[in-house]
Structure formats: C-alpha cells, structure tokens
Amino acid sequence: MKKNILTTLLAAVLYFLCVGIGVFLGHLVDQTGNMFYAPAFSALVGGSVYMLLLTKVPRFGAITTLGLFMAIFFLTSKHGAGAFLPGLACGLAADAIARLGNYKDRIKNTLSFLVFAFSTSGPIFLMWIRPKAYVATLLARGKSQEYINRIMVAPELDKILLFVSSILLGALIGAVVGQTISKKLTHKI
C-alpha cells in the first residue's frame, strides 16, 4: 500500500514536470503566452508517465490522484475553480474507464488517457466559457490589458476544433509511446 502511494506521488510529480515541458513546447510553437498548445504537448510527453502508473498501480485512485494533483495546481496558481474542475473530473472519469479494463486493456487505457489529457485544459475552457471572469482573474493576478488582449483566444469553431483535436492527437501518440515503453520496462523486470 505504501509503495503504491509513493509510486502515485512520484508519478504526479513526473506528470507535473511533463506539463512544464508541454508548456515550454507550446510556447515554442505559439509565443502569444496563452498556453493553447500546452495541453496537447503535455499529453504527448506525459503519456509514458501515465501508462507506467497504470502498470505499477493498477488500482482505482491512482489516476484520480493524478487528476487531483493537476486540479490543485490550477487552483493554487490562481486560475480559479473553473480551471480546477477539469483536473478532478477528467481524473475520475479516466480512472473509471481504465478500471473497466482492469487497468490492463490497451484500448481502454488509451481511451482513459484521451480523457485524462483534458485535465490540463481548464484555463482555455474557462477563457471560452466565462471570458469576463477569466479576464478578472488575470487582472487580479496583476496582468496588463495588453497581455490579456494578446492571450485571449476567441471561442470560434475552428479554434475549438483545433484545440480539441490537438489534445486528442497528442494524447493518442503519448499513449502509444507510453504503452510501448511500459511494455518494454515490464518485460525487463
């Protein structure tokens, strides 16, 4: 039990680092500062951590904890409760999907990660669902109006489709790479 908790906490820290790498890669692609591509790159990089966690701790709660960790990050970094909810909801849903396949079914685990990949999308969804609240949050954090004008992304259908499809593509590639790495590592042990 203690080993599972430590493994889950280590995975949460590693996934958080993957999110940081995702933010960096997203910034290389789009320098506006709005983190539009960060969830997609986070999923691409984080798929290995996620799949290894499913292999090492095949029990309900590990993925939920990972989602909760992301949710708490968004809440404590003053993104607001609206950015908190996707982390929690996606973590719970992803855990439930993986559980349907006893954490061993490749397709269910992939689907689980496709859902989990949206756990870091809260700030963008909040920007689209409640733009005035999002702007107020940024102003309260000391951001300038020029910065706000630069990072805002209009909720137009083409941008929404690009956002969702980029996350799904990043998550799919991340899941396949993660399953391959996980399989190789577990066969060596």
Image (tube, rainbow, N blue to C red):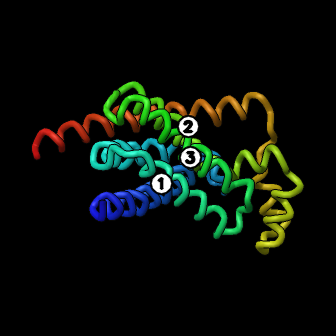
Nearer to me, 112 or 170: 112
| Mark positioned earlier in the residue sequence (3 or 2) | 3
How packed mark 3 is, by other alpha carbons closer than 10 Å (few <14, some 14-19, many 20 or more), is many
- Identify the disc placed on residue 167: 2
Three-letter amino acid code at the position of disc 1: Leu
The answer to whether residue 40 is above or below residue 165 is below
- Counting from the top left corner in percent of width and height, residue 164 is at 63, 33
| Precedes in sequence: disc 3 or disc 1 | 3
Q: Position of residue 180 (x, y in %)?
A: 26, 35
Q: Which residue is mark 3?
A: 39
Q: Residue at image x 53%, y 52%?
A: 67
Helix or strand or loop: what does disc 1 sit on?
helix
Question: Which residue is under mark 1?
Answer: 66
Residue 11: image x %, image y %? 37, 57
Q: Earlier in the sequence, mark 1 or mark 2?
A: 1
Find residue 172 and name its label.
none
Work out whether residue 48 can be spotted. no
Q: Is residue 143 above or below residue 55?
A: below
- Labels 3 & 2 near each other (Cβ < 8 A): yes
Nearest to viewer (mark 3 / mark 1): 1
Q: Residue furthest left?
A: 188
